[in-house]
Image (cartoon, helix red, strand yellow):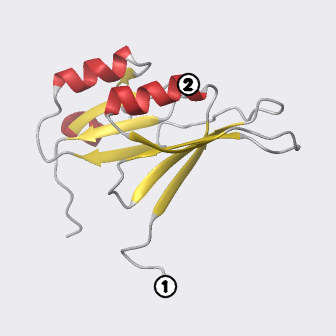
Amino acid sequence: MPVNAHSHIRIARPSRDLLVAEAFWTQGLGLSVLYRARAGVAPGEHDLLMVGWPDASWHLELVHETAAPVEPRPTTEDLLVIYLDEEVPEELVTRLQAHGGKRVTSPNPYWNEWGVTIEDPDGYRLVLCTRGWSHT
């Protein structure tokens, strides 16, 4: 199958604590756990958590290797943007904050005008955008 609009996308990131991250993404945002694996004993193996919506064409993979953890190093431009095409429900923001998220101001005024930015427990930014997505 060639790479095209139907190709599935995996966004992979290190995590400090998969249990905390899982709470943010599932109980906070409402994603499902799609897959989970515990590390074996071989060097370089890591714990793995995949979250997403089962019918989406993307998912988020979070990894943690206890023996040699990789520290997340997000910047203010490492964004996962979800286009809601409506106002951001305040109860969603409250739920994300209750599960380890932190509401922040974006250095890009566009995201402050058109959405809400939440840092996940690892410092990566989730933008809930009030606009709808259009590639035109």
In the rendered image, which residue does mark 2 sit on? 19
Q: Along the line of sight, which residue is nearer the eye, 112 or 126?
A: 126
Q: Residue 112, how many percent across, how many down?
A: 26, 33
- Residue 95 to residue 37: above or below: above
The amino acid type of the residue labelled 1 equals Pro
Q: Residue 66, how many percent across, how many down?
A: 77, 29
Quarter of image, res 89: top left
Residue at image coords 36%, 52% = 54
Q: Residue 53, how many percent across, how many down?
A: 35, 48
Quarter of image, res 49: top right
Q: Residue furthest left?
A: 86
Decide if residue 96 is on the left or right side of residue 120: left
Residue at image coords 45%, 25% = 23
* Label placed on residue 2: 1
For marks 2 and 1, the one nearer the N-term is 1
Residue at image coords 11%, 42% = 86
- Residue 35 to residue 72: above or below: below
The amino acid type of the residue labelled 2 equals Leu
Quarter of image, res 106: top left
Q: Residue 61, how many percent across, how many down?
A: 55, 46
- Residue 62 to residue 93: above or below: below
Q: CA distance from mark 2 to mark 1?
A: 36 Å
Looking at the rendered structure, the secondary structure element under dot 1 is: loop
Q: Along the line of sight, which residue is nearer the eye, 60 or 84?
A: 60
